[in-house]
Amino acid sequence: MANQHKHKQRVIRGIPDDLVEEVDTAARAAGSDRSAITRQLWEWYASRPGAELPKRPADKG
């Protein structure tokens, strides 16, 4: 199918739009994207072997 995604989509509810925008901006600044950051966080949280927290961009302050 033309509009079918390669991966099954997962929905996370209850995230405020402003937080999504901040995460997207920070992810781009770190050379990444929201999906990759989320996957890394999930792997780290589940204690998968070799999993590390994603890199964050430099502090804003």
Image: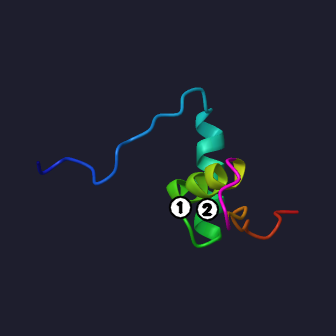
Tell me if label 2 and label 1 are in contact, CB under 8 Å: yes
Question: Looking at this view, is 39 or 58 the one in front?
Answer: 39
**Residue at which label 2 appears:** 27
Where is residue 48 drawn, in percent x and y? 65, 57
Q: Earlier in the sequence, mark 2 or mark 1?
A: 2
Where is residue 57 drawn, in percent x and y? 73, 68
Where is residue 11 drawn, in percent x and y? 46, 34
Quadrant of the image containing the C terminus: bottom right
Q: Who's the residue at 11% across and 48% down the image?
A: 1
SS at mark 2? helix
**Residue at which label 1 appears:** 33
Q: Which residues are magenta?
A: 46-50
Q: Is residue 60 left or right of residue 49?
A: right
- What amino acid is labelled 2 in the image? Ala
In the image, is residue 14 above or below residue 28?
Answer: above
Question: Looking at this view, is 22 or 5 the one in front?
Answer: 5
